[in-house]
Image: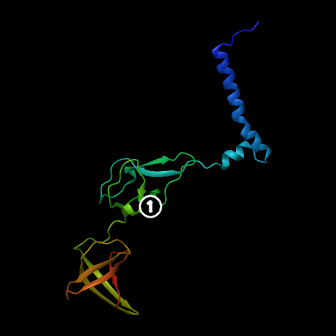
Amino acid sequence: MILPISCSAFRRTALVLALVAGGMPAVAQESAGQSATQIAANQAAGEVVLIPNRVIYPGETIELAALKEVTLIPGKHKPDAVATLAEELNGKVAKRTLLPGRYIPTNAIRDAWLVEQGAAVQVLFTAGTLTISATAVTLQPGAAGDLIKVRNSDSGKILSGTVMEDGTIRVSAS
């Protein structure tokens, strides 16, 4: 006499077989010289990145409060040329609109200006022990290391110089 198998018994049997079959690859890999814990340790955990949690508009200084930390799913990697670390983003200025939940491209941020357009600055020319200083007005804004144009206040001549960390402009002979 054949007894009919109930659906719940069939489902339990299928579940048990699925669980047993799911453990097979780890057992097979253990025989190759790696334990299951070593295999799990070798798999990369999700990468942590920072993304905006609200719209950040062009010209706005990026603060850590406007960012949220997210972990990428394992196996997914961030694209190249995106800023993801707090050091890369804190205090920088957005060059374009940054949308919530999107990566922040490195070309979409810039350093804050050290000198603003129209500001009076000290211009320095140094050659050996000779140093000449003058006052000039900036014709464009600039961050440290940027090459900008300035107008000498006394002569009216336009010079190009590099913005230094202290906010002065270093010019060279041309």
- Does residue 34 appear left or right of residue 72 in this picture? right
Q: Residue at x 51, y 47 (%)?
A: 72
Q: Pick whichever, 36 or 1, lies toward us.
A: 1
Q: Residue at x 64, y 20 (%)?
A: 11
**Residue 87 position by quadrant:** bottom left
The kind of residue on which mark 1 rests is: Glu
Q: Pick whichever, 122 or 18, lies toward us.
A: 18
- Does residue 100 appear left or right of residue 3 in this picture? left
**Residue 93 position by quadrant:** bottom left
**Residue 15 position by quadrant:** top right
Does 91 appear above or below 52? below
- Does residue 172 appear left or right of residue 83 in this picture? left
Q: Pick the quarter of the image with the C terminus.
A: bottom left
Measured as percent of width and height from the top left, residue 27 is found at: 76, 39
Measured as percent of width and height from the top left, residue 115 is found at: 29, 72
Q: Which residue is mark 1?
A: 88
Measured as percent of width and height from the top left, residue 144 is found at: 37, 73
Q: Pick the quarter of the image with the N terminus.
A: top right
Q: Residue furthest front?
A: 1
Q: Residue at x 35, y 88 (%)?
A: 172
Does 163 appear above or below 71? below
Does 42 appear above or below 166? above
Task: Tell me which colouring the rendered structure shows.
Answer: rainbow
- Does residue 26 appear left or right of residue 119 in this picture? right
The 10 Å Cα crowd at callout 1, few under 14, some 14 to 19, many 20 or more, is some
